[in-house]
């Protein structure tokens, strides 16, 4: 008996000896983090842990969240500590639909967004022509005829004629892109160099606007803009220009608190350059890219270009972009019934349905999301029809998350289809308040109330709404678009169909976790949770709680990407 008892004691002692190191290990403090943000209001958009005071980050990932006291254990000698002093920290903004190179290019041309009249634009062009070399092309972007204080004279459909530009720039070709990107205004020299004459016919999906005598006014809608033959850079000059554009866009996005930018359409050539810049570690923001090129150019290359979380999460290529119609401002959106203010037109179908159906087959076969620009109710219906036919033809393919980009004006019959089909509504809050002054003029009150920017109706259908700005159509600033989403307030104080406003948390989720979900990236970004990328924006004021009209005054204090401060105000 004594021997048995001794044997048991020996075994027990051995077990205790083996367990002791484990117990000591369990009691050891965690490894020091690289970065700790503390003494703030950290909103995670995670239901399990909605808020915290502090967050610990190791490498490019979130380690832990909790109280300031609890996170102190992650602070070591080399840990960088940022005292937020009560400021709001949120997941980094996700721009769910913008044109990345367009944001950069906007910095290199005449900025027409603030022009209050056509005369002001003519003056700007004249000043540029006076400094330009003979024959040098003058470019600008951002004009919108509905935002001028007075209509130009003479005018056709509210648009000016090119004679005014010819007077100030007779020898320099001028190309001025509409704010929407769906129309172009050119002078006589640009038309002459491009071979546009009185006899030139409008191309399919486009329109050369003409005056009463049949002469081109200078306004080119949709695909007609492609008739302008601007000079093309080649070789080293082309790459240098592309790098400059990417650098400018990156800087602009980071300064606005954007950590992921979903690029709404780039060529394979541009994607090659993006990849090169990512490989060099020279891109701060994360890019998720839609390929935008002819089907025949990409069909054999899609499998090779598909990239998921490449370069430590800085480049993903898994979408294809098509454009089925134009924009409402230039009367190019494809409608089921004629424009109220232009009864002879239902807009333009800019890409044949058969071509987009071919793209749908390519997307299914190669594991890409199909992302279709659709603004008018007819454009949206045709797009949903394409999606539904593709889904029925491929019943084994589930959770495809195909996207309608914009989804601005819908028929009541089509709103429930978004939720039923699992289609993402990639919309832009700022478009609502920017376009509202002329929406009723274009559509009439019944159609506007039924289907214009119907965020609540779409969410009730079960659809996920991802938010953005369509930059450079609008400023890439998420705070302005967030404000538009929660207020729908116009500059004159009117509220555009207030029943469709988002709550502040709905709007925040539309700019964070919903954007991640719309790109199949919700497992590694879009909310603040241990294990996810440490992508955050710190704001100067609490946009979830300040008086509504104080929201636009909020500024980005820090933008953090992968645990590194990429922008500091």
Image: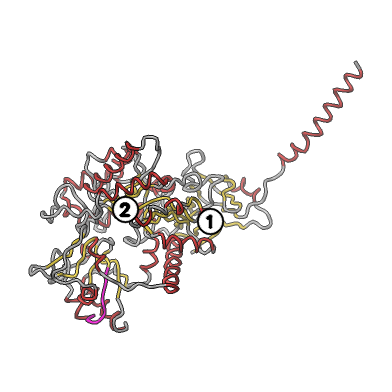
Disc 2/disc 1 C-alpha distance (Å): 26 Å
Identify which residue, 282 or 276, lies in the foreground. Answer: 276
Residue toward you, 487 or 272 = 272
> Residue at the spot x=87%, y=23% of the render?
7
How many C-alpha atoms fall within 10 Å of the one at disc 1: few (<14), some, or many (≥20)? some
Q: Where is residue 227 in the image (x, y as percent from the top left)?
A: 24, 67
Looking at the rendered structure, the secondary structure element under dot 1 is helix
Camera-nearest residue between 247 and 498: 247
Kindly identify the residue that appears in the image at 17 percent across and 65 percent down.
208
User: Quadrant location of residue 17?
Assistant: top right
Point out the residue furthest to the left here: 213
Name the chief secondary structure element in magenta: loop
The spot of residue 384 in percent (x, y) is 28, 43
Name the image quarter holding residue 97: bottom left
Mark 2 surroundings within 10 Å by alpha-carbon count, few (fewer than 14), some (14 through 19), many (20 or more): many
Pointer 1: what residue? 311
Of pointers 2 and 1, the one earlier in the residue sequence: 1
Q: Do the residues labelled 2 and 1 touch (CB within 8 Å)?
A: no
Q: Can residue 237 be seen in this view?
A: yes
Q: In which quarter of the image is the N terminus?
A: top right
The span shown in magenta is 169-176
Image coordinates for residue 538, horizontal then vertical, percent = 48, 56
Residue 480 shows in the view: no
Can you identify the residue that label 2 sits on?
Answer: 322
The secondary element bearing badge 2 is classed as strand
Horizontal side of residue 305 vs 34, given as left or right = left
For the point 37% across and 59% down, the residue is: 99
Q: Is residue 189 above or below residue 58?
A: below
């Amino acid at each position: 008996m004594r021997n048995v008892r001794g044997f048991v004691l020996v075994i027990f002692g051995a077990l205790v000896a083996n367990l002791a190191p484990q117990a000591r290990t369990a009691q050891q403090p965690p490894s020091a983090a690289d970065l700790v943000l503390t003494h703030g209001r950290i909103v995670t958009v995670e239901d399990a842990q909605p808020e915290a005071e502090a967050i610990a980050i190791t490498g490019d990932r979130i380690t832990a969240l909790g109280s300031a006291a609890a996170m102190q254990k992650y602070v070591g000698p080399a840990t960088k500590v940022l005292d937020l002093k009560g400021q709001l920290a949120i997941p980094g903004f996700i721009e769910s639909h913008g044109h990345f190179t367009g944001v950069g290019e906007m910095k290199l041309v005449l900025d027409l967004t603030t022009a209050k009249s056509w005369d002001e634009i003519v003056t700007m062009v004249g000043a540029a022509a006076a400094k330009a070399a003979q024959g040098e092309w003058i470019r600008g972007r951002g004009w919108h005829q509905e935002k001028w204080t007075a209509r130009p004279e003479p005018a056709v459909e509210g648009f000016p004629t090119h004679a005014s530009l010819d007077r100030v720039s007779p020898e320099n070709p001028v190309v001025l892109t509409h704010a929407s990107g769906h129309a172009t205004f050119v002078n006589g020299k640009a038309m002459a160099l491009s071979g546009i004459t009185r006899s030139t016919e409008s191309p399919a999906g486009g329109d050369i606007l003409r005056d009463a005598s049949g002469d081109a006014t200078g306004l080119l809608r949709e695909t007609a803009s492609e008739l302008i033959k601007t000079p093309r850079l080649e070789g080293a000059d082309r790459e240098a220009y592309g790098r400059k554009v990417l650098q400018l866009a990156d800087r602009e996005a980071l300064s606005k608190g954007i950590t992921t930018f979903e690029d709404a359409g780039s060529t394979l050539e541009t994607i090659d350059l993006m990849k090169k810049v990512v490989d060099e570690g020279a891109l701060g923001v994360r890019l998720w890219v839609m390929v935008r090129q002819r089907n025949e150019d990409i069909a054999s290359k899609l499998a090779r270009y598909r990239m998921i979380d490449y370069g430590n999460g800085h480049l993903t290529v898994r979408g294809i972009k098509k454009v089925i119609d134009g924009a409402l401002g230039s009367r190019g959106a494809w409608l089921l019934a004629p424009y109220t203010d232009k009864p002879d037109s239902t807009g333009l179908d800019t890409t044949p349905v058969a071509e987009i159906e071919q793209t749908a087959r390519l997307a299914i076969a190669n594991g890409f999301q199909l992302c279709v620009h659709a603004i008018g109710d007819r454009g949206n219906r045709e797009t949903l029809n394409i999606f539904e036919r593709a889904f029925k033809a491929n019943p084994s393919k589930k959770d495809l998350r195909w996207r309608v980009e914009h989804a601005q004006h819908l028929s009541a019959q089509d709103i429930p289809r978004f939720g039923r089909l699992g289609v993402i509504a990639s919309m832009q809050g700022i478009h609502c308040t920017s376009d509202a002054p002329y929406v009723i003029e274009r559509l009439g009150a019944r159609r506007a109330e039924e289907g214009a920017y119907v965020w609540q109706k779409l969410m009730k259908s079960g659809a996920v709404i991802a938010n953005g700005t369509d930059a450079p159509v609008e400023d890439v600033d998420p705070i302005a678009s967030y404000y538009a989403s929660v207020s729908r307030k116009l500059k004159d104080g009117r509220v555009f169909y207030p029943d469709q406003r988002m709550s502040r948390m709905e709007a925040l989720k539309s700019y964070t976790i919903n954007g991640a979900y719309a790109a199949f990236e919700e497992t590694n970004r879009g909310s603040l949770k241990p294990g996810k990328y440490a992508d955050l924006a710190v704001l100067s004021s609490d946009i979830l709680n300040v008086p509504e009209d104080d929201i636009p005054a909020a500024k980005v204090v820090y933008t953090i990407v992968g645990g590194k401060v990429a922008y500091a105000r």
